[in-house]
Protein backbone atom coordinates (compact mmCIF):
# COMPACT_ATOMS: atom_id res chain seq x y z
CA UNK A 1 0.00 0.00 0.00
CA UNK A 2 1.55 3.24 -1.11
CA UNK A 3 1.39 6.54 0.70
CA UNK A 4 0.51 9.74 -1.21
CA UNK A 5 3.24 12.38 -1.05
CA UNK A 6 1.73 15.31 -2.97
CA UNK A 7 2.32 18.66 -1.26
CA UNK A 8 -0.98 20.00 0.14
CA UNK A 9 -0.15 23.53 -0.99
CA UNK A 10 0.54 22.53 -4.59
CA UNK A 11 -2.52 20.29 -4.70
CA UNK A 12 -5.04 22.83 -3.39
CA UNK A 13 -3.70 25.60 -5.64
CA UNK A 14 -5.21 23.67 -8.55
CA UNK A 15 -8.53 22.61 -7.02
CA UNK A 16 -11.78 23.85 -8.61
CA UNK A 17 -15.34 23.18 -7.47
CA UNK A 18 -18.18 22.48 -9.88
CA UNK A 19 -21.51 22.85 -8.09
CA UNK A 20 -24.46 21.14 -9.78
CA UNK A 21 -27.53 23.31 -9.21
CA UNK A 22 -29.83 22.40 -12.08
CA UNK A 23 -32.30 20.11 -10.30
CA UNK A 24 -35.97 20.90 -9.92
CA UNK A 25 -36.63 19.32 -6.50
CA UNK A 26 -40.11 18.11 -7.42
CA UNK A 27 -40.54 16.11 -4.20
CA UNK A 28 -40.57 19.41 -2.27
CA UNK A 29 -43.57 20.75 -4.14
CA UNK A 30 -45.45 23.03 -3.57
CA UNK A 31 -42.68 25.01 -1.84
CA UNK A 32 -40.19 24.00 -4.52
CA UNK A 33 -41.04 25.29 -8.01
CA UNK A 34 -39.23 25.62 -11.32
CA UNK A 35 -38.20 29.18 -10.44
CA UNK A 36 -37.41 28.34 -6.82
CA UNK A 37 -36.15 24.75 -6.62
CA UNK A 38 -34.93 22.94 -3.52
CA UNK A 39 -31.43 24.43 -3.63
CA UNK A 40 -32.95 27.92 -3.23
CA UNK A 41 -35.07 27.05 -0.19
CA UNK A 42 -34.20 28.18 3.33
CA UNK A 43 -35.96 25.44 5.29
CA UNK A 44 -32.69 23.76 6.35
CA UNK A 45 -31.07 26.79 7.97
CA UNK A 46 -31.01 30.57 7.68
CA UNK A 47 -29.49 30.42 4.20
CA UNK A 48 -30.29 28.42 1.08
CA UNK A 49 -28.77 25.02 0.37
CA UNK A 50 -26.65 26.42 -2.46
CA UNK A 51 -25.30 29.16 -0.20
CA UNK A 52 -24.41 26.51 2.37
CA UNK A 53 -22.64 24.48 -0.34
CA UNK A 54 -20.44 27.45 -1.21
CA UNK A 55 -19.83 28.34 2.44
CA UNK A 56 -18.45 24.93 3.40
CA UNK A 57 -15.82 25.16 0.63
CA UNK A 58 -13.98 27.90 2.55
CA UNK A 59 -10.40 26.88 3.13
CA UNK A 60 -10.40 24.46 0.21
CA UNK A 61 -11.65 26.34 -2.87
CA UNK A 62 -11.76 30.16 -3.16
CA UNK A 63 -14.70 31.86 -4.95
CA UNK A 64 -12.65 32.55 -8.08
CA UNK A 65 -12.31 28.80 -8.62
CA UNK A 66 -15.97 27.87 -8.01
CA UNK A 67 -18.29 27.20 -10.95
CA UNK A 68 -22.04 26.77 -10.62
CA UNK A 69 -24.06 25.08 -13.36
CA UNK A 70 -27.78 25.69 -13.18
CA UNK A 71 -30.79 26.35 -15.43
CA UNK A 72 -32.20 29.50 -16.97
CA UNK A 73 -35.16 29.60 -14.54
CA UNK A 74 -32.98 30.31 -11.48
CA UNK A 75 -29.76 31.73 -12.95
CA UNK A 76 -30.49 35.35 -12.02
CA UNK A 77 -31.51 34.43 -8.47
CA UNK A 78 -28.28 32.49 -7.88
CA UNK A 79 -26.22 35.39 -9.28
CA UNK A 80 -27.99 37.71 -6.83
CA UNK A 81 -27.55 35.41 -3.82
CA UNK A 82 -23.86 34.65 -4.48
CA UNK A 83 -22.18 37.92 -5.41
CA UNK A 84 -18.79 36.51 -4.40
CA UNK A 85 -18.88 34.14 -7.41
CA UNK A 86 -18.00 35.77 -10.73
CA UNK A 87 -21.08 36.02 -12.93
CA UNK A 88 -19.38 34.22 -15.84
CA UNK A 89 -18.74 31.26 -13.51
CA UNK A 90 -22.48 30.81 -12.91
CA UNK A 91 -23.61 29.05 -16.07
CA UNK A 92 -27.23 28.62 -17.17
CA UNK A 93 -27.48 25.43 -19.20
CA UNK A 94 -29.63 25.90 -22.32
CA UNK A 95 -31.07 22.37 -21.95
CA UNK A 96 -31.20 19.63 -19.32
CA UNK A 97 -28.77 16.93 -20.46
CA UNK A 98 -28.06 15.24 -17.08
CA UNK A 99 -24.67 15.34 -15.39
CA UNK A 100 -22.16 13.94 -17.91
CA UNK A 101 -22.41 16.78 -20.49
CA UNK A 102 -22.37 19.40 -17.72
CA UNK A 103 -19.27 17.94 -16.11
CA UNK A 104 -17.57 17.63 -19.50
CA UNK A 105 -18.33 21.27 -20.27
CA UNK A 106 -16.87 22.31 -16.91
CA UNK A 107 -13.77 20.17 -17.47
CA UNK A 108 -12.94 21.98 -20.71
CA UNK A 109 -13.31 25.36 -18.99
CA UNK A 110 -11.05 24.31 -16.10
CA UNK A 111 -8.47 22.74 -18.41
CA UNK A 112 -8.35 25.97 -20.43
CA UNK A 113 -7.56 27.90 -17.24
CA UNK A 114 -5.29 25.38 -15.60
CA UNK A 115 -3.74 22.27 -17.26
CA UNK A 116 -3.21 20.78 -13.77
CA UNK A 117 -6.73 21.63 -12.57
CA UNK A 118 -8.49 19.17 -10.26
CA UNK A 119 -12.28 19.39 -10.31
CA UNK A 120 -14.59 18.44 -7.44
CA UNK A 121 -18.21 17.78 -8.46
CA UNK A 122 -20.65 18.72 -5.70
CA UNK A 123 -24.47 18.71 -5.65
CA UNK A 124 -26.03 22.00 -4.50
CA UNK A 125 -29.06 20.55 -2.72
CA UNK A 126 -27.62 18.36 0.03
CA UNK A 127 -27.35 18.91 3.79
CA UNK A 128 -23.96 18.29 5.43
CA UNK A 129 -24.02 18.71 9.20
CA UNK A 130 -20.28 18.14 9.73
CA UNK A 131 -18.61 20.66 7.40
CA UNK A 132 -15.16 20.25 8.98
CA UNK A 133 -15.25 16.49 8.36
CA UNK A 134 -16.45 17.18 4.81
CA UNK A 135 -13.51 19.52 4.16
CA UNK A 136 -11.06 16.96 5.53
CA UNK A 137 -12.43 14.21 3.28
CA UNK A 138 -12.56 16.54 0.27
CA UNK A 139 -8.94 17.62 0.74
CA UNK A 140 -7.80 14.00 0.87
CA UNK A 141 -9.82 13.16 -2.24
CA UNK A 142 -8.40 16.14 -4.12
CA UNK A 143 -4.83 15.26 -3.23
CA UNK A 144 -5.32 11.68 -4.38
CA UNK A 145 -7.03 12.77 -7.59
CA UNK A 146 -4.12 15.07 -8.45
CA UNK A 147 -2.35 12.11 -10.05
CA UNK A 148 -3.35 11.75 -13.73
CA UNK A 149 -5.69 8.86 -14.50
CA UNK A 150 -7.28 8.61 -11.07
CA UNK A 151 -10.98 9.12 -10.38
CA UNK A 152 -12.23 9.51 -6.81
CA UNK A 153 -15.71 9.24 -5.29
CA UNK A 154 -16.43 10.80 -1.91
CA UNK A 155 -18.82 8.21 -0.53
CA UNK A 156 -21.04 8.09 2.54
CA UNK A 157 -21.02 5.36 5.17
CA UNK A 158 -24.55 3.83 5.05
CA UNK A 159 -26.75 4.15 8.12
CA UNK A 160 -29.66 2.07 6.82
CA UNK A 161 -30.55 -0.21 3.85
CA UNK A 162 -31.70 2.61 1.57
CA UNK A 163 -33.12 1.54 -1.82
CA UNK A 164 -33.16 5.02 -3.35
CA UNK A 165 -29.37 5.49 -3.47
CA UNK A 166 -26.55 4.11 -5.55
CA UNK A 167 -23.89 2.02 -3.82
CA UNK A 168 -20.11 1.74 -4.23
CA UNK A 169 -18.39 -1.56 -3.41
CA UNK A 170 -15.01 -1.10 -1.78
CA UNK A 171 -11.93 -3.13 -2.59
CA UNK A 172 -8.36 -3.19 -1.29
CA UNK A 173 -6.69 -0.26 0.47
CA UNK A 174 -4.72 1.93 -1.94
CA UNK A 175 -3.20 4.55 0.35
CA UNK A 176 -3.75 6.97 3.19
CA UNK A 177 -3.76 10.77 3.40
CA UNK A 178 -3.82 12.18 6.91
CA UNK A 179 -6.52 10.22 8.74
CA UNK A 180 -8.36 9.30 5.53
CA UNK A 181 -8.03 5.83 4.02
CA UNK A 182 -8.13 5.60 0.23
CA UNK A 183 -9.78 2.41 -1.03
CA UNK A 184 -10.19 0.98 -4.49
CA UNK A 185 -13.70 0.86 -5.93
CA UNK A 186 -14.73 -2.49 -7.38
CA UNK A 187 -18.27 -1.79 -8.55
CA UNK A 188 -21.13 0.74 -8.75
CA UNK A 189 -24.70 -0.48 -8.20
CA UNK A 190 -27.78 1.69 -8.76
CA UNK A 191 -30.74 1.56 -6.35
CA UNK A 192 -30.80 -2.09 -5.23
CA UNK A 193 -33.89 -3.88 -3.98
CA UNK A 194 -34.33 -3.95 -0.20
CA UNK A 195 -32.93 -7.49 0.45
CA UNK A 196 -29.78 -6.64 -1.52
CA UNK A 197 -29.44 -3.25 0.18
CA UNK A 198 -29.62 -5.01 3.55
CA UNK A 199 -26.80 -7.35 2.53
CA UNK A 200 -24.71 -4.41 1.33
CA UNK A 201 -25.03 -2.55 4.62
CA UNK A 202 -24.40 -5.66 6.72
CA UNK A 203 -21.22 -6.46 4.77
CA UNK A 204 -19.64 -3.07 5.62
CA UNK A 205 -18.01 -3.13 2.17
CA UNK A 206 -20.24 -0.50 0.58
CA UNK A 207 -20.68 3.26 0.59
CA UNK A 208 -23.57 5.33 -0.63
CA UNK A 209 -22.84 7.16 -3.87
CA UNK A 210 -23.72 10.79 -3.08
CA UNK A 211 -22.72 12.15 -6.49
CA UNK A 212 -19.48 13.76 -5.30
CA UNK A 213 -16.62 12.99 -7.71
CA UNK A 214 -13.08 14.33 -8.07
CA UNK A 215 -10.64 14.10 -11.00
CA UNK A 216 -8.12 16.14 -12.89
CA UNK A 217 -9.99 17.91 -15.69
CA UNK A 218 -7.60 16.32 -18.17
CA UNK A 219 -8.39 12.85 -16.79
CA UNK A 220 -12.12 13.43 -17.18
CA UNK A 221 -11.74 14.60 -20.78
CA UNK A 222 -9.46 11.67 -21.68
CA UNK A 223 -11.99 9.22 -20.22
CA UNK A 224 -14.79 10.83 -22.24
CA UNK A 225 -12.71 10.60 -25.41
CA UNK A 226 -12.15 6.90 -24.78
CA UNK A 227 -15.59 5.85 -23.51
CA UNK A 228 -17.99 8.48 -24.89
CA UNK A 229 -16.32 9.62 -28.13
CA UNK A 230 -19.42 11.22 -29.65
CA UNK A 231 -20.02 13.34 -26.56
CA UNK A 232 -16.31 14.18 -26.37
CA UNK A 233 -16.38 15.50 -29.95
CA UNK A 234 -19.45 17.61 -29.20
CA UNK A 235 -17.81 19.10 -26.11
CA UNK A 236 -14.62 19.81 -28.06
CA UNK A 237 -16.69 21.68 -30.64
CA UNK A 238 -18.25 23.82 -27.89
CA UNK A 239 -14.79 24.46 -26.40
CA UNK A 240 -13.44 25.49 -29.82
CA UNK A 241 -16.27 28.03 -30.11
CA UNK A 242 -15.37 29.64 -26.77
CA UNK A 243 -17.03 27.29 -24.26
CA UNK A 244 -19.20 28.86 -21.59
CA UNK A 245 -18.34 32.37 -22.81
CA UNK A 246 -20.05 31.89 -26.19
CA UNK A 247 -23.72 31.79 -25.23
CA UNK A 248 -24.89 31.52 -28.83
CA UNK A 249 -22.75 28.46 -29.58
CA UNK A 250 -23.69 26.90 -26.25
CA UNK A 251 -27.41 27.22 -27.03
CA UNK A 252 -26.87 25.67 -30.43
CA UNK A 253 -24.54 22.80 -29.57
CA UNK A 254 -25.17 21.78 -25.94
CA UNK A 255 -28.72 20.44 -26.52
CA UNK A 256 -27.32 18.02 -29.12
CA UNK A 257 -25.31 16.13 -26.50
CA UNK A 258 -26.60 12.81 -25.17
CA UNK A 259 -28.66 13.03 -22.00
CA UNK A 260 -26.80 10.72 -19.62
CA UNK A 261 -25.48 10.71 -16.06
CA UNK A 262 -21.77 10.67 -15.29
CA UNK A 263 -22.32 7.37 -13.43
CA UNK A 264 -23.55 5.54 -16.55
CA UNK A 265 -21.34 7.45 -18.98
CA UNK A 266 -18.07 6.89 -17.15
CA UNK A 267 -17.88 5.82 -13.52
CA UNK A 268 -19.29 2.32 -13.98
CA UNK A 269 -16.80 1.69 -16.81
CA UNK A 270 -13.55 2.93 -15.27
CA UNK A 271 -10.88 0.81 -13.60
CA UNK A 272 -8.79 3.40 -11.73
CA UNK A 273 -11.54 4.52 -9.34
CA UNK A 274 -10.94 5.16 -5.64
CA UNK A 275 -13.12 6.10 -2.69
CA UNK A 276 -12.82 8.27 0.38
CA UNK A 277 -15.42 7.43 3.03
CA UNK A 278 -16.97 10.43 4.72
CA UNK A 279 -18.79 10.54 8.07
CA UNK A 280 -19.99 14.06 7.30
CA UNK A 281 -23.58 14.17 8.53
CA UNK A 282 -24.84 13.90 4.97
CA UNK A 283 -28.42 13.85 3.70
CA UNK A 284 -29.71 14.37 0.19
CA UNK A 285 -32.96 15.73 1.72
CA UNK A 286 -34.87 13.78 -0.90
CA UNK A 287 -38.39 14.21 0.47
CA UNK A 288 -40.54 16.03 2.99
CA UNK A 289 -40.20 12.98 5.28
CA UNK A 290 -36.42 13.48 5.36
CA UNK A 291 -36.93 17.18 6.08
CA UNK A 292 -39.12 16.12 9.02
CA UNK A 293 -36.36 13.87 10.37
CA UNK A 294 -33.80 16.68 10.14
CA UNK A 295 -35.96 19.30 11.86
CA UNK A 296 -36.42 20.20 15.53
CA UNK A 297 -39.68 18.82 16.98
CA UNK A 298 -41.96 19.66 19.88
CA UNK A 299 -42.77 17.18 22.66
CA UNK A 300 -45.38 15.52 20.44
CA UNK A 301 -43.04 15.06 17.51
CA UNK A 302 -44.53 17.89 15.48
CA UNK A 303 -42.57 20.26 13.26
CA UNK A 304 -44.58 23.42 12.81
CA UNK A 305 -44.24 27.18 12.29
CA UNK A 306 -45.30 29.85 14.75
CA UNK A 307 -48.41 30.67 12.73
CA UNK A 308 -50.11 27.37 13.54
CA UNK A 309 -52.04 25.58 16.26
CA UNK A 310 -52.16 21.83 16.88
CA UNK A 311 -54.53 20.02 19.25
CA UNK A 312 -54.05 16.32 20.00
CA UNK A 313 -51.67 15.94 17.04
CA UNK A 314 -48.41 14.04 16.69
CA UNK A 315 -45.71 13.41 14.13
CA UNK A 316 -46.75 16.09 11.64
CA UNK A 317 -44.71 18.48 9.51
CA UNK A 318 -46.49 21.79 8.91
CA UNK A 319 -45.17 24.45 6.54
CA UNK A 320 -47.10 27.65 5.90
CA UNK A 321 -45.94 30.81 4.17
CA UNK A 322 -49.22 32.76 4.42
CA UNK A 323 -52.05 31.04 6.27
CA UNK A 324 -52.67 30.28 9.93
CA UNK A 325 -52.78 26.47 10.09
CA UNK A 326 -54.91 24.58 12.60
CA UNK A 327 -54.71 20.79 12.94
CA UNK A 328 -56.83 18.65 15.27
CA UNK A 329 -56.41 14.96 15.96
CA UNK A 330 -54.16 14.10 13.02
CA UNK A 331 -50.90 12.20 12.97
CA UNK A 332 -47.92 11.62 10.68
CA UNK A 333 -48.96 14.08 7.97
CA UNK A 334 -47.08 16.48 5.72
CA UNK A 335 -49.07 19.72 5.27
CA UNK A 336 -47.51 22.44 3.11
CA UNK A 337 -49.36 25.66 2.21
CA UNK A 338 -47.97 28.27 -0.17
CA UNK A 339 -50.91 30.55 -0.89
CA UNK A 340 -51.68 29.18 -4.35
CA UNK A 341 -51.37 25.48 -3.46
CA UNK A 342 -51.88 23.09 -0.54
CA UNK A 343 -50.29 19.66 -0.07
CA UNK A 344 -51.71 17.15 2.41
CA UNK A 345 -49.79 13.89 2.36
CA UNK A 346 -49.15 10.89 4.61
CA UNK A 347 -45.57 11.26 5.82
CA UNK A 348 -44.74 7.75 4.66
CA UNK A 349 -45.92 8.63 1.13
CA UNK A 350 -43.86 11.81 0.73
CA UNK A 351 -41.68 10.20 -1.96
CA UNK A 352 -44.81 10.22 -4.15
CA UNK A 353 -45.02 14.02 -4.25
CA UNK A 354 -42.90 13.85 -7.39
CA UNK A 355 -45.62 11.73 -9.00
CA UNK A 356 -48.16 14.45 -8.25
CA UNK A 357 -45.91 17.03 -9.94
CA UNK A 358 -45.71 14.77 -12.99
CA UNK A 359 -49.51 14.61 -13.11
CA UNK A 360 -49.69 18.41 -12.86
CA UNK A 361 -47.29 18.60 -15.82
CA UNK A 362 -49.46 16.16 -17.82
CA UNK A 363 -52.50 18.32 -17.09
CA UNK A 364 -50.51 21.36 -18.34
CA UNK A 365 -51.29 23.31 -15.15
CA UNK A 366 -48.02 25.18 -15.54
CA UNK A 367 -48.88 27.98 -13.13
CA UNK A 368 -48.47 25.48 -10.29
CA UNK A 369 -45.06 24.22 -11.44
Image: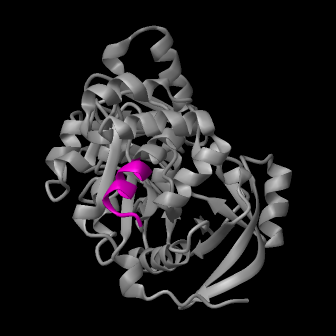
Q: Residue at x 24, y 57 (%)?
A: 47
Q: Position of residue 261 (x, y in %)?
A: 58, 41
202 relative to 260, above or below: below
Q: Hey, which residue is sitting farthest front in the picture?
A: 240
Residue 339 vs residue 107: left or right?
A: left
Q: How is the image coloured?
A: one colour
Q: Residue at x 48, y 46 (%)?
A: 104
132 relative to 116, above or below: below
Q: Position of residue 172 (x, y in %)?
A: 79, 78
Residue 111 vs residue 179: left or right?
A: left
Asked whether residue 326 appears in the rendered view, the answer is: no
Count of marks overlaid on the render: 0
Q: Name which quarter of the figure residue 144 lies in.
A: bottom right
Nearer-the-camera pick, 111 or 327: 111
183 relative to 313, above or below: below
Q: Quadrant of the N terminus?
A: bottom right
95 relative to 364, above or below: below
Q: Residue at x 22, y 63 (%)?
A: 64
Asked whether residue 302 appears in the rendered view, the answer is: yes
Q: Residue at x 58, y 32 (%)?
A: 352
Instruction: Please check the rendered image and state whether residue 323 is part of the magenta-colored stretch, yes or no.
Output: no
Q: Quadrant of the C terminus?
A: top left
Nearer-the-camera pick, 296 or 36: 36
Which residues are the magenta region?
106-115
Nearer-the-camera pick, 253 or 61: 253
Q: Position of residue 209 (x, y in %)?
A: 62, 58
Q: Position of residue 244 (x, y in %)?
A: 30, 40
Residue 66 vs residue 316: left or right?
A: left
Give the main secondary structure, helix, strand or loop, of the magenta stretch.
Answer: helix
Amino acid sequence: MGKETNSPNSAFAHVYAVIMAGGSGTRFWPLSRRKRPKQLLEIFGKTTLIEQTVERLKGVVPPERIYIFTNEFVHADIVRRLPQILKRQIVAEPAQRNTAPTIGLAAHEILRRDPAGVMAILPADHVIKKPAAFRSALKAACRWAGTPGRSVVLGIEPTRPETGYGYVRLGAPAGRIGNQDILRVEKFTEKPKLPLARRYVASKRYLWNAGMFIWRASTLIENLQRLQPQMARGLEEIAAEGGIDNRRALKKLFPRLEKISIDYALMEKLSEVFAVAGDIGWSDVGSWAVAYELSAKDKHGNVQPGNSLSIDCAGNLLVSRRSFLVTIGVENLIIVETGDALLVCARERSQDVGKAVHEIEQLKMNKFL
